Structure formats: structure tokens, C-alpha cells
Amino acid sequence: MPPHLSADRPAAQPPPSGSVEALISQARRLKGDVDASRRDTSADGSDPQGRWQRALYDLALHQLDDLDEHLAQLRDGPQPLPEAPAPADAPPAVRAVPTAPRRGSLLSRVGSAEWNLLTDEASWSGELYQILGRDPAAEPLTLDELPSLVLDEDRRRLTVMVTDCLIDAKPIDGEFRVVRPDGGVRTVHMMGEPVLAADGSTASMWAVLRDVSELRRSQRTVSETRDSLQRHRHHAQSERRLAVELQEAVLPPWRGSLRLPRQGPQALDLAAHYLPSSTSALIGGDWYDALELADGDTLLSVGDLTGHGVTVTSGMAMLLGALRGMSVAGTRPGQLMSWLNQLLDAAVQPALGSAICCRYRPATRTLTWAQAGHPAPLLFRGGTGRVLNPPSGVLLGATSGAVYGEAEETLEPGDVLLLHTDGLAPGHWEDSSAADRLLALAPRFGEARTAQECVRAVVEEFGETEREDDACVLVAKVAP
């Protein structure tokens, strides 16, 4: 038979072995770097982003394994076929058996085939026998026999590709699934072209077939983890939006300064600010509140329910509603804390919270307050500040039947009272360095004309701090 000419290009010459060795070394160094980065990623299965990153690393490693194997085939040449079929009664050790693909790799050994249309002969490389799981001693399948290996739903696809190649000289580039003799289903990617005889007629068809089963599995894993990550982010965004709406509906609607009571020389000038976490996209359970009571007293409170998200924000709304209702009924701060503790202790979902509740009587400028595991208020007077001595009180929800003490402080005209939650600055508030940053603002508070100016000074000091938690600050300035 006259030599065939490729429909598009002459046969490629094998590359020099030295250059292939260099490429193999580069591929293996890159694989080592990728594997090292993969080990540094979080292995926590509960993190959608970590699962997606891990899947991408796995896919990259699979592809580098694949590249290493292909380069090795370039260096070593095609695998030879057996020179003669082994007798049927030969012992297993002598009979050729297809090598099982290496588990955990891309299993993408590349095989080749050529089908001669003039003689109806077929020739397969040794790798193709391994891909299809067939005995290398068996005769290669003809183009008419090849569809017998393909899943029923993919046979038409293979038929269309082969027909387009032989009749319309279209290159083959597609995938189909084959069933191996052991029952395993593999995905095969096939690329091929018609080969023309000297007179221009189609003499044969050659093809390169590659097992891409594990590659497609890795790509599906990446796609699934990406979809999971997107759903997680969408859920987090929806939860945050709901939590923000709930928080805005519950916290006092006033912005800037508020004067309580609205008349009288002993009125409090009030201002507050909410500072979100810099490390979490979810809303926490921090609150601040100021309420003018029927007897003329003013209720001041701040608190924090542990955790983030809609559940925590709704729990905060429950506590704040209970606090307002009991304060309107005349409950003193200590007893109010006891009942809040009982409410949280009996909740369906266990939670912990801290709070501080102050009742200010304008007629005598007396501040009565109680706290539940919360940072004590800071009192600024005459350009200096101090932390008030806290009465006894444990975290809300920490123990049943807890009793909370009360403390009293007489304020003077011009005093500034600062309440805050413990997320305002990193570290524990038992560490004096955190409170010292607030106390260092005393000169600015002494010069401030309004509570809003005091809050602005706090935000300027702490607004850029890397906070792991949300925080609230409430400032009350006694009218001069």
C-alpha cells in the first residue's frame, strides 16, 4: 500500500530525550510546590471555601501527574504489543494481562489506533488495550465493532463523529463512555483525522484516545464544591441582610444626640454608635438602648449575646424587649438582671450574654446600675476618667438562680458616662491596657460640648481596630 499522507500535517518527529528529561524535572518540581501548598490549606470539611480550594489543588495535582506520565511516554516511546499471542492454556504468569491503571492518578494513559478503510484492518497501541481493559493478545476492533464497547446512550455520538470524519473530513474531538470487561465505566476522549491516499481519497482514519475519567471526576468535584461555596455565600449574605434588618428594627432609631428627659436642667445628652466586626461578615448580638420611663427616670443599657447571625440577633431582640418591658414596669436593675438570666437560662437554644443596666434619676442625678459579666462603665469628670467599681454579677445564662448586686453613683453637671461592649478593642477587658485607651480620651471628653463629640472621639480611636467581634458604645453627658 502506498504511504499515507496526513490530511493536515506531516508526522511529527520525536523530541530530543534531553529536553524531555528537563520538562519532566520541571513538572515534578512544580508538582512538589503545589502539593506543599495543598497541605497548607484547611482540611476542615465544614468550610465550603476550604473544600473548594482543596478540590482545585487535587485537580492541579492530577493534571501534573497526567503531564508527568505523558512526558514519560514521550521519552520512552509507545508500549509494544506482544509479538505472538500466548496459548490459551498458558499459565497466568505467562499470559499477558492488561495492567490496572494506577489508583489515585488521572488514569489518562494515551493510546492510539488506525483503521484502514481499504483492507478493513485495525492496529492499536498497547496503551489503548490498557485503557479499554482488553487482552493485548486479542485482535483490535474494527470501526464497526468499536461501538460494542460504548454505553448505549453514547453510541450515536461516536457514530456521528466517525461519519463526519470519514465523509466530510472533519477532525474528531469528543468524548464517550466505554464499559470495560470488569464492568468499570471509563470516559474516553478521542481525537482523530482522516488520512488521505495519494489520489486524495480517504484511505484510513487515525485517532488518539485518552482515558479522562478521573480528570472529569476531579473537575466535577471542583464544580460541586464551587457551587456549594456559592450557595454558602448566598446563604450568608441573606442571613446577614436579615440580621441587619432585624438589628435596625430593634436598636433605637435615633442618630446623633438624644436628650432625655426632654426638658429640665438635669437632662442627659445621649449618643451611641455600633461598630461591626472587621473579621466576620455576620452581625453579632450587641445592643445599646436609652429609654425615658414614665416616672421621669432614664434607662441606659448595653449588652452582648455571644455568637453571630440571625439566631443571635433575634435572641438579642428578645432580651432587649424584655429589658424594656420590665423597666417600664419599674423593676430595679439588680432584679431585672436576675429575670433576664432566668429568661436566657430557660431559652430553647442555650446562650450566654453580658449586659449592663443603669437607671438615672434626674432629680438627684443618681445612677443605679447592675451588671452581668460586663465591662463596668467609665466616668469622666474634669478632664480625668475612672472605671466604676462593679457590683457582683455573672454572665446571663451561666447559672440558674443567679443574684445580681447594685451600685450607686452620684453624677455631677458636665460628667460623661461611657458604656460599651467588650468587642470595642481586642483582648480581655480585665487587661487594663484596653480600658486605658478609653481613659486616655479624658482630655478630649473634657473639651467636648456634646455626647456626639465624645462618641466621635471613640470611633476615631477604635474605628480602625481589627476587631473579632461587634461592639457598641453609648455616651451620656450630664447637662452642665
Image (spheres, helix red, strand yellow):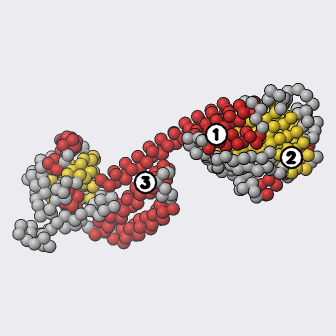
Q: Choose the circle earlier in sequence order: 1 or 3.
A: 3
Identify the residue position indicated by label 2 in the image.
379
- Quick check: marks 2 and 3 in contact, CB under 8 Å? no
Relative placement, left or right, of 115 versus 473 is left
| Quarter assignment of residue 410 | top right
Q: Is label 2 or label 3 in front? A: 2
Q: Report the amino acid beneath label 2.
A: Leu
- Quick check: marks 1 and 3 in contact, CB under 8 Å? no
Rendering coords of residue 373 (x, y %): 72, 50
Crowd rating for badge 3 (residues with CA inside 10 Å; few <14, some 14–19, many 20+)? many
Identify the residue position indicated by label 3 in the image.
55
Relative placement, left or right, of 87 versus 371 is left
Q: Choose the circle earlier in sequence order: 2 or 1.
A: 1
| Quarter assignment of residue 295 | top right
Rendering coords of residue 211 (x, y %): 27, 55
- SS under mark 3: helix
Crowd rating for badge 2 (residues with CA inside 10 Å; few <14, some 14–19, many 20+)? many
Label 1, label 3: how far apart the Cα atoms are: 45 Å
